[in-house]
Image (cartoon, helix red, strand yellow):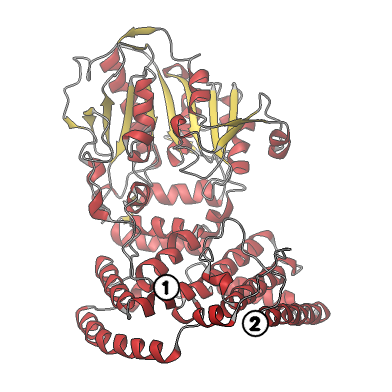
């Protein structure tokens, strides 16, 4: 990306400070190599590497690459044009960089995007050498992406896979990821006399040990948090449990509460306490402050014994069991539901089942948070769901009875590799620093397993075949699901920068149901856009009273608002919350509390 910015002239003395002393650096690196050798030898003697743990081509990329090369060379003239264009750009960059080396004013031809934090250190701009390294990397990256994007004859699936893998490759070879091409790391190496590299090696070995022989990058200080002590602290009790879930009821904090109780169905790919991290950003705590009687499903972290649990079981033992227990505790015949991500997909299927059985009256309204129901445009996640990869996952799940939660965590990390992988490689292993204590990343690494039967169904029926939008495409316990029969009032909340459930894909759900649907789009991503308390006054959101077929048309006519979407939702749910009644006691006398929130199920770790 070319910019009009001008480089400042640099004096000789200042320029010399920007280049590491090669003699001093070589001495430091020799000392580091000598000190690191016994550490590495000790690690190798303790670690056994099983070749079967490594899959050479997990995304079946080879086929896509061969197809790409075939189509690329179908037009040799275009290949030649691209090569000439690249050489021309390189010459232009070298001319401008030479000016900067000479202390003259020069034009910055390639600058990182505003959201690219890899080159934020001023050392990248102060030194002509590292500025050239940075710009040459950006130039080459843009050119490679253009070649992939402009090659004709590729189908959409192949092109998407190539674009994704190209981004992964370019992220991996960034000069920020290597000692000798990252000025910030070089400076730290000289200043600390190599201590950063020794600490980084120790951090690397600890992460390999933590991953039982495979690298499991630390993203936060895991000792800084404890469930029930400084995260997931909203007061409540577990009032019911079965094989799949614990039901938590939270204490009322207002004298009066809404008559109709509120049930939250979180995803079981992650744990529910994303909605209850700390007091200042807890959605659950905020809901109690608004006068809701709040119940939350806390899913179990399944092991091999639960391998045969089906999608239907999550509906029956999750949603239906929870509603039955809430009816006992409150005496109310129905509930308002809030469903997040995969929990929302399950809830949509449940609404379809209830509509077919003419039992929809037990759910008065449903709020969907970043939920995919129509998976046609599900984004990069679909790249992990082709036949070859699903078959590979089936083999892994057949051996264990479940999909290890770390697999999903790694997949989500790949969707944002620069932020979730390479930034920690630089911080932990090159700079030798400890990761910062961050509650969100603690939650992100608290992985959950997926039962084999359920997950195989979900991958095939939803991501691969996209059958939920088809009448009778999915059958639950012998009942054909028809989303068009759903008349339950629904509120859809999506987020602008969602990399897991792209907002235009989630918007498609507004065209499926036949009842009232309200769609709201929040700024930021899959988590930050949802967990956005009003007092922080961050981000913003868009609303539109109409839901046209085209999401772009919806957005072009939407009204922009500052701050959190939470108060806007509270106005909407007020229509379905009922009158106010005296605050309820936990269990209501019908359910005996089992243990304090957040319960024991949420503390189970992925196998």
- Compared with residue 6, is residue 466 higher up or lower down, i.e. above or below? above
- Compared with residue 208, is residue 235 higher up or lower down, i.e. above or below? above
The residue wearing badge 2 is: 101
In depth, the one of 474 and 219 nearer the eye is 219
Eye-nearest disc, 1 or 2 = 2
Report the label total: 2
Q: Residues within 10 Å of mark 2 (few under 14, many from 20)?
A: some
| Residue 521 visible, this orientation | no
Q: Could you tell me how far apart the alpha carbons at marks 1 and 2 are, in whole angstroms?
A: 45 Å
The residue wearing badge 1 is: 55
Circle 2 sits in a helix, a strand or a loop, which is it? helix
- Residue at 35 percent across and 37 percent down: it is 313
- Of pointers 1 and 2, the one earlier in the residue sequence: 1
- Compared with residue 535, is residue 212 higher up or lower down, i.e. above or below? below
Q: Residue 422, how many percent across, how many down?
A: 45, 66
- Residue at 33 percent across and 47 percent down: it is 439
Q: Is residue 58 left or right of residue 517?
A: left
Q: Residue 69, how many percent across, how many down?
A: 68, 77
Q: Is residue 375 left or right of residue 436?
A: right
Q: Quadrant of the C terminus?
A: bottom left
- Residue at 37 percent across and 71 percent down: it is 431
| For the residues bearing labels 1 and 2, Cβ distance under 8 angstroms | no
Q: Quadrant of the N terminus?
A: bottom right
Q: Residues within 10 Å of mark 1 (few under 14, many from 20)?
A: few
Q: Is residue 261 left or right of residue 388?
A: left
Q: Check residue 336 in the rendering and tell me which mark sits there, or answer none.
A: none
Q: Is residue 183 left or right of residue 277?
A: right
- Compared with residue 473, is residue 588 higher up or lower down, i.e. above or below? above
Circle 1 sits in a helix, a strand or a loop, which is it? loop
In depth, the one of 103 and 408 nearer the eye is 103
In the picture, residue 128 is in which quadrant?
A: bottom right
């Amino acid at each position: 990306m070319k910019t009009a910015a001008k480089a400042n002239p640099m004096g000789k003395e200042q320029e010399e400070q920007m280049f590491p002393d090669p003699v001093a650096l070589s001495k430091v690196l020799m000392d580091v190599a000598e000190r690191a050798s016994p550490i590495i030898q000790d690690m190798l003697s303790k670690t056994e590497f099983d070749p079967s743990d490594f899959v050479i081509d997990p995304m079946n990329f080879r086929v896509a690459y061969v197809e790409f090369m075939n189509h690329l060379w179908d037009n040799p003239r275009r290949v030649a044009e691209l090569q000439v264009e690249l050489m021309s750009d390189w010459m232009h960059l070298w001319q401008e960089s030479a000016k900067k080396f000479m202390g003259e004013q020069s034009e910055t031809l390639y600058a990182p995007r505003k959201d690219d934090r890899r080159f934020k250190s001023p050392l990248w701009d102060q030194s002509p050498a590292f500025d050239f390294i940075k710009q040459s990397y950006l130039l080459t990256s843009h050119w490679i992406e253009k070649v992939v994007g402009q090659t004709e004859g590729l189908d959409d699936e192949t092109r998407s896979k190539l674009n994704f893998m190209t981004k992964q490759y370019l992220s991996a070879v960034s000069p920020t990821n290597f000692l000798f091409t990252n000025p910030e790391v070089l400076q730290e190496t000289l200043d600390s006399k190599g201590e950063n590299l020794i600490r980084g090696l120790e951090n690397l070995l600890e992460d390999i040990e933590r991953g039982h022989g495979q690298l499991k990058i630390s993203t936060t200080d895991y000792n800084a948090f404890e469930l029930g002590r400084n995260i997931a602290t909203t007061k409540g009790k577990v009032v019911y449990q079965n094989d799949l879930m614990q039901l938590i009821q939270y204490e009322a904090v207002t004298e009066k509460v809404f008559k109709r109780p509120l049930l939250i169905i979180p995803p079981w790919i992650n744990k529910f306490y994303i909605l209850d991290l700390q007091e200042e950003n807890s959605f659950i705590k905020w809901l109690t402050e608004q006068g809701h009687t709040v119940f939350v499903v806390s899913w179990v972290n399944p092991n091999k014994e639960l391998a045969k649990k089906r999608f239907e079981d999550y509906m029956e033992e999750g949603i239906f069991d929870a509603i039955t227990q809430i009816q006992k505790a409150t005496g109310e015949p129905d509930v308002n539901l809030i469903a997040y991500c995969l929990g929302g997909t399950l809830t949509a299927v449940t609404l379809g089942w209830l509509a077919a059985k003419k039992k929809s009256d037990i759910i008065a309204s449903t709020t969907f948070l970043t939920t995919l129901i129509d998976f046609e445009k599900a984004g990069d996640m679909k790249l992990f769901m082709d036949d070859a990869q699903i078959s590979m996952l089936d083999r892994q799940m057949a051996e264990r009875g479940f999909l290890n939660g770390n697999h999903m965590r790694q997949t989500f990390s790949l969707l944002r590799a620069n932020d979730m992988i390479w930034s920690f490689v630089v911080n932990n292993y090159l700079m030798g620093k400890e990761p910062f204590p961050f509650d969100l990343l603690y939650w992100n690494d608290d992985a959950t397993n997926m039962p084999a039967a359920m997950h195989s169904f979900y991958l095939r029926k939803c991501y691969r075949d996209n059958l939920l939008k088809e009448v009778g495409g999915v059958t639950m316990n012998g009942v054909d699901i028809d989303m068009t029969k759903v008349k339950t009032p629904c509120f859809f909340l999506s987020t602008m920068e969602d990399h897991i459930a792209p907002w235009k894909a989630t918007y498609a759900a507004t065209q499926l149901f036949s009842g009232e649907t309200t769609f709201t789009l929040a700024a930021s991503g899959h988590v930050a856009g949802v967990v956005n308390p009003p007092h922080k006054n961050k981000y913003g959101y868009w609303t539109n009273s109409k839901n046209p077929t085209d999401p772009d048309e919806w957005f072009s006519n939407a009204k922009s608002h500052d701050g959190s979407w939470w108060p806007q939702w509270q106005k909407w749910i007020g229509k379905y919350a009922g009158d106010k009644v005296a605050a309820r006691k936990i269990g209501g006398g019908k359910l005996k509390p089992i243990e304090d929130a957040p319960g024991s199920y949420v503390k189970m770790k992925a196998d």
